[in-house]
């Protein structure tokens, strides 16, 4: 069964044949559809589930740019590789919303073009960032790791798309809504469970939203707290959160949940008051252990009062445990056996520093 369905739209049968044969040779994963004019191409796009469109701008009937405009107006977004022999400026501001991911000038060798297409399709299919992660965690990692691509999620009855480049939010698209209205809908529903897909595509979207991904997470967290989302029917708060804890601790917890090196953790103060734990039963043994009492009491007691940062790695029951001070709290993490703690500790400190800057900006 073919993995990728690609539509080639070009009136030149030689170009269509060359691209089709080259794609078939590079991999058996491709199902190739063809159209020789824009009208036929539009019908195929509306009927088939496509992964990519290769489009000549000078096809008869509805030309290439008119076809792209119709797709935008109908809320259809597809990665499009444009092939052209005209003087079309690939940086033209009119083209940024059309889903164009690459421009190829004629004449070209089909063998070289399909290598680029194969790279685009394989990057689309990567799932490493979204496995077992919440949407807020995904957004934080996108910003911190400076990713480029788009997220597709269901918002209400429509598919919403969030475009980001180098970790920066560029645009949010929901059919029938302005970018600002779409952004509001996205924030309001950020903590809802939904199907998420991610595509690592170097799109050409212009920046339309003056808001960072981390700011979105914190704003959604604030709205979530105000609405009381996260309490079950018995009024018990999720993740063992206690009244009076820092409003942004859920954001820190989402960050910890997203790190594959962390098996479990607790967030507590110097007196042993637990604000969050994951899993929930991971707290009593830690807080009552001699390591916690001696290390936290002796090493961090005065530092907490003085506001001095500190961190420590230690071993306990054949596990690696990282004890990390963050603001007025202590985070105790059980790390996986494979974790190189010096590398992870540096990574964690960088992430927490970036998070701290965002929290300060928010306040």
Image (cartoon, rainbow, N blue to C red):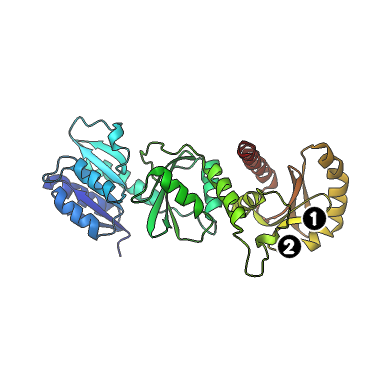
| Circle count | 2
**Mark nearer the N terminus (2 vs 1):** 1
Q: Is residue 282 left or right of residue 65?
A: right
Horizontal side, residue 124 vs residue 247: left or right: left
* Mark 1 surroundings: few (<14), some (14-19) or many (≥20) residues within 10 A: some
Q: Can residue 278 be seen from the camera position used here?
A: no
Question: Quarter of the image containing the C terminus?
Answer: top right
Residue 342 in percent (x, y) is at 69, 43
Please indicate whether residue 307 sits to the left or right of residue 108 in the image.
right
Residue 343 drawn at (x, y percent): 66, 43
Q: Residue at x 34, y 51 (%)?
A: 175
Q: Where, by quadrant of the figure, is residue 327 drawn?
A: top right
User: Residue 273 got which mark?
Assistant: 1
* Residue found 76% across the figure and 61% down from its top: 283
Per the image, label 1 sits on a secondary structure element best described as loop
Judging depth in this view, the residue of 327 and 18 nearest the camera is 327
Which type of secondary structure does the marked residue at label 2 adopt?
Answer: loop
Q: Residues within 10 Å of mark 2 (few under 14, many from 20)?
A: some
Quadrant holding the N terminus: bottom left
The part of the image, by quadrant, that contains residue 29 is bottom left
Residue at image x 40%, y 43%? 179
- Alpha-carbon span between mark 2 and mark 1: 13 Å
The residue that mark 2 highlights is 282
């Amino acid at each position: 069964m073919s993995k990728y369905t690609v539509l080639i739209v070009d009136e030149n049968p030689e170009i269509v044949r060359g691209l089709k044969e080259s794609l078939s040779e590079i991999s058996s994963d491709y199902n190739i559809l063809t159209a020789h004019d824009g009208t036929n191409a539009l019908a195929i796009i509306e009927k088939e589930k496509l992964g990519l469109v290769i489009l000549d701008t000078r096809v008869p009937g509805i030309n290439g740019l008119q076809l792209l405009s119709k797709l935008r107006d109908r809320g259809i977004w597809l990665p499009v590789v444009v092939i052209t022999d005209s003087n079309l400026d690939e940086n033209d501001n009119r083209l940024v919303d059309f889903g164009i991911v690459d421009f190829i000038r004629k004449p070209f060798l089909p063998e070289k073009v399909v290598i680029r297409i194969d790279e685009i399709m394989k990057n689309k299919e990567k799932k490493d960032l979204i496995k077992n992660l919440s949407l807020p965690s995904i957004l934080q990692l996108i910003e911190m790791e400076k990713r480029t691509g788009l997220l597709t999620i269901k918002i209400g009855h429509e598919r919403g798309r969030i475009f980001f480049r180098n970790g920066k939010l560029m645009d949010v698209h929901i059919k029938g809504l302005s970018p600002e209205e779409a952004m509001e809908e996205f924030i309001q529903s950020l903590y809802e469970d939904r199907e998420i897909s991610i595509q690592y595509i170097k799109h050409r979207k212009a920046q339309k939203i003056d808001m960072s991904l981390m700011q979105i997470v914190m704003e959604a967290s604030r709205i979530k707290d105000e609405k009381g989302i996260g309490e079950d029917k018995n009024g018990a708060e999720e993740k063992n959160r206690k009244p009076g804890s820092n409003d942004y601790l859920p954001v820190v917890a989402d960050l910890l949940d997203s790190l594959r090196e962390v098996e479990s953790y607790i967030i507590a103060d110097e007196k042993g008051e637990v604000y969050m734990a994951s899993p929930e039963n991971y707290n009593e043994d830690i807080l009552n252990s001699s390591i916690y009492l001696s290390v936290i009491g002796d090493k961090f007691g005065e530092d907490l009062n003085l506001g001095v940062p500190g961190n420590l790695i230690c071993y306990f029951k054949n596990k690696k445990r990282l004890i990390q001070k963050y603001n007025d709290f202590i985070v105790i993490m059980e790390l996986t056996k494979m974790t190189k703690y010096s590398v992870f500790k540096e990574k964690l400190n960088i992430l927490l520093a970036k998070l701290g800057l965002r929290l300060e900006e928010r306040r």
